[in-house]
Structure formats: structure tokens, C-alpha cells
Image: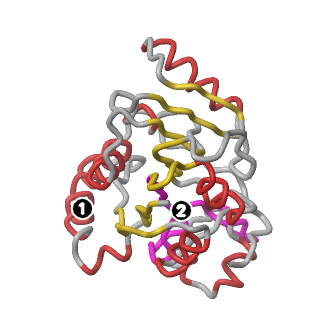
Amino acid sequence: MNEIKNISLGQPIEYGFLGIKRRAELIKRHVNLNAKYILDIGCGNGAQSFAFLEDVRKCVAIDVEEERLQTFRDNLERRNIRNCDIMTMDATSLDFPDNKFDACLCIETLEHIQQQEKALNEMHRVLKESGNLVLSVPNRWWIFETHGASLPFLPWNRIPFFSWLPKKTHDRYARARIYTKREIIELVKNAGFRVLAIEYFMPPLDKLKRRSLQKFLRKILFSLEKTRLGLFGVSIFVFAKK
């Protein structure tokens, strides 16, 4: 894949958003995390991580943004949760021994990592044999560029169908990678994983302020996830094993 010149760090999902619950439900349909030792890569503020902490035996959560990790720490302390260790760490250089974790979660993070192949190789290394990888990335065929783009003369950067432009054009202005199903499967397989399932995920539109419109659009989009039109979802979820 082409490298994004203007690649930037992502924005974590916000506490209380429906997207947290829907992602967790999807993941739990495919992977049993009960009493497992998991690595959460790109945890950010921890909003998504909390959806799994009641199930897992132990979680190690990492990110490169210390400010967001502090928010996570503060919330862990406030809720008196003790089964999660938080570390500032780069996914391309995981400071863990081989074969350590039962599962690795990397949710909406890979697209922001400069050396994505190296990061995937590291995930493979630290997983136990038959360990689970759960990965989600932006879908090329969603109608909006979810991370925006540095486009000249256009202050509103979420232009419809920008992500559908030829890859060379997209990558010149984009702030994060986007993927087709074929591309992400190839990357995961090249890192040594066996792909078990692929799911498309429709956006919950949590930031849409008009609640009546939000409710209407959610009903339509969620009904499309299991149809052929699901391939236009905002994200691709990959479930794989070492």
C-alpha cells in the first residue's frame, strides 16, 4: 500500500457513544474474551476498552498519546477497576515477550501507524499460539473520508466520495489510510495470521445532533449491515488467529 505523507493520530471514540456498545457486541459474537489476557493497542482514552474489562482476566492497554492515557487512568481509578495496566508504547515495538497474550485488539488504529506491517508482525509475535486478533480499519467504500483530508481551499474536509478517488490521489491528501476488504486481508495474512471472518460495520452517527434524524438513519444503516450493501459500511472488522 502507498504510504500517507500526512498521516496523523486518530481521535478516540467518546464515552457514552452507542458505537462503543455496538463494536463490543460485534466482537463478542466472534471472540470469547472471558478470563483472557488481552492486549489493547491504540486504547486512547479507554472509552472502548471499558466494554471488555468486566469480562477479561487482565488487560494491558497501550497508546502513544499520554494525555489520553491519563484520562483512561483517571476513569479506572474513579471506578476502582484493577485488572488493567496502561502503558505508553508504540505498536511497532512492543515491549513484551513472545507468546504472551490470548487476544489482541486493535480498533481503528492501524490506519494511523506509519509502519503498519511491522505493527502487525509485532501483534503476531506477542500472541500465544491460536491467539485471537481483532482488527478494525476504515472502509474505502464508505461515502465519506472519516479522518478528513488536507485539501486546498476546502475548510470542510469530509467531502463525499473522496475516499473513492484513485489511491494515489487519495493518499496525497488523506490523514489516514483506508482499506478494501482484499487489502486488509492480504496484510493480515502476510503477518502470519489465519483470517476467520470479516464483518462490515455501519456508523452509529453518534455525533449527529438532530436526534430524530439520527434515529431514522440508524434504523436504515443498521438494517443494511447483513445485506450486500453492508460492504459500504464505515469500518471493516477482521477476526483472525495466529
Q: Which residues are magenta?
A: 132-155
Dominant secondary structure (helix, strand or loop) of the stretch shown in magenta: loop
Query: Residue 6: percent from the left, percent from the top?
Result: 77, 64
| 239, 25: nearer the viewer | 239
Residue 164 position in % (x across, y down): 54, 82
Foreground residue, 175 or 127?
127
Instruction: Left or right? Give the position of 147 relative to 21.
Output: right
- Tag 2 residue: 146
Magenta stretch contains residue 135: yes
Between residue 223 and residue 59, name the one nearer to us. 59
- The three-letter amino acid code for the residue at tag 2 is Thr
Q: Residue at x 46, y 44 (%)?
A: 102
Mark 1–mark 2 Cα distance, whole angstroms, equals: 18 Å
Percent x, y for residue 53?
40, 29
Q: Which residue is mark 1?
A: 222
Q: Indicate whether 206 appears above or below 110.
A: above
The residue under the point 34% across, 45% down is: 24
Residue 4 image-quadrant placement: bottom right
Q: Secondary structure at mark 1?
A: helix
Which residue type does callout 1 highlight? Phe
Residue 93 position (above or below residue 62): below
The residue depicted at 74 percent of the width and 62 percent of the height is 115
Location of residue 191 with respect to 10 vertically, above or below: below
Asked if residue 58 is among those painted magenta in the image, a careful observer would answer no
Figure label count: 2
Circle 2 — which element? Answer: loop
User: Mark 1 or mark 2: which comes first in sequence?
Assistant: 2
